[in-house]
Image: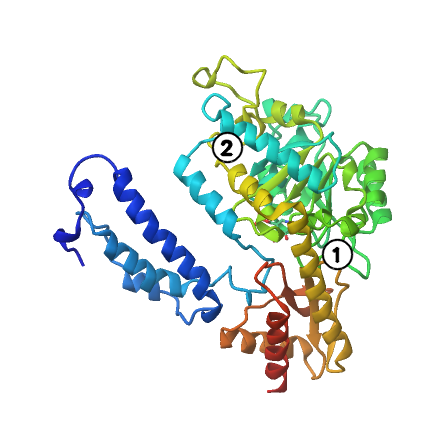
Amino acid sequence: MRDPKKLTSDQLALGDMSPGDFRDAAHRVADLAADYLERLPAYDVLPKIAPGATRAKLPGAPPAAPEPLDAILADYRSIVEPYITHWQHPMFMAYFPSVASGPGILGEWLSATLNSNVMLWRNAPSSTELEEVVVSWLRQMLGLPQTFDGMFTDTASISSLLSIVAARHAVPGLAARDEGLSGRDGVGRLRMYASTEAHSSIEKAAIVAGIGRSGLRRIPADGEYRMIASALQEAIVEDRAAGWTPFCVVATLGTTSSTSVDPCEAIAAVCRRERLWLHVDAAYAGAAAIVPEMRPLLAGWEHADSIVVNPHKWMFTPFDASLLLFRTPETFRDAFSIVPEYLRTPEAGGVHNFNEYGIQLGRRFRALKMWMQIRWFGVEGVAARLRDHVRLAQLFRNWVDADPDWELLAPVPFSTICFRYKNGVDLDAVNAAILERVNAGGQVFLSHTKLSGTYALRVALGNPRQTDEHVARCWAFLKAAAAK
Ligand code: PLP
């Protein structure tokens, strides 16, 4: 594999790859990236690969001596690229979409080149201010009031964790930041609330924030998987009487299984009455607010104390990019800020030092890709694409609805459809077998969930490369699998 004649002089000296070599290599990598996007439809979305197969092709120990770029790129092409599950593929309809647009990829590439670590204004002035501007752009795109400020994090899991720690910090007299929660006299147990349909990240946040899994009370959902606001109210009253200290409610707008929308207006009213922090998890469906006629679906979220929307889900932004919006930035800052001597800068006070609002010191420069992407598509361009995903979802929904052998299992407010084949004795097993058969073909990738204990197939759309033809092919694969 190693051919010393193919090494460059940069590799044999000290120092990094020279700008000249970088330019040559970057052109080749740009070709590889464009070739990949061109080749994408020809790949099966799911590779034929057994566990351990990639590891077996790779040396167990790192190379002691430099290797030529040719060899590295050739291995990338033959060992890595063909054997990923292709998240970029239009036939990837599992989970939720996580797709990287062309301009987003370019922004990610430039951000890696600059390697700007957005922890303090001093060491990232234009990156910090670009983040402020792009957060404000996104807030406006979502139709949320100016009272929200925010920042980017890596994932919704972290955005929700930060919000729950901020909510905990806002509990009067608790002083958990300084005193912790364990072994203290006179401190009631904290209780937070989310529906039975809320994402597992909320439960993880409860674990990490010291609330514990039993401190998270699950509120029942109605027949359409939406939190029952009156049950929330009753639970809070019951908990207070039993000595708990309620402090936070998580409303999910676009749940992971069925994309149901909790009644945010009613939940916000409960939070107002009971003086509880309202965190809105709109990781997937929040993007729908960019489409003006869909905005009413999210009504009430403007009352939240914190909101998470993931551009890396339904806004074609390269992973990772989670938008965390908050109403009182000072609560986050008070909860997290620690400024040791080595982080003191003369501008402190007049500028945003983003590290003070969360756990991480070092932060990726995520605003650049978002900025490039929003400019390249324009807000109307983003909205048009989301609208088209909703159209495609309705198309698919109508095929299921019109077919006597299939049934819908939940409403379809956004771009995700939950359904099942309805002929057979053990329908859970029948549908699991259909999923297995469809995915085994490799040409479409679907996932499943359970709704009220019933096995449900899921088709999740949201890739700007998706067209009518892709959803029609998916439906044909499903019908063929069921016919067998
Ligand atoms: N919240 C909801 C509603 C989700 O559907 C998901 C993931 O699908 C998450 C949170 C977690 O997202 P992340 O992977 O960004 O942590």
Hey, which residue is sitting farthest top in the picture?
346
Could you tell me the amino acid type at mark 1? Ser
Q: Nearer the viewer, residue 348 or 361?
A: 348
Left or right placement of residue 366 versus residue 448 in this view? left
**Residue at label 1?**
260
> In terms of image quadrants, where is residue 16?
top left
Going from the N terminus, do you reach mark 1 or mark 2 first? 1
Q: Which residue is mark 2?
A: 360
The answer to whether any part of residue 179 appears in the image is: no
- Mark 2, secondary structure of its residue: loop
Quadrant that contains the N terminus: bottom left
Left or right relative to 348: residue 456: right
Residue 458: x and y in percent read 65, 66
Count of residue discs: 2
In this view, 478 is above or below 312: below
Q: Secondary structure beneath disc 1?
A: loop
The residue lying furthest to the left in this view is: 5
Q: Residue furthest bottom?
A: 484
Whether the residues at callouts 1 and 2 have beta carbons within 8 Å, the answer is no
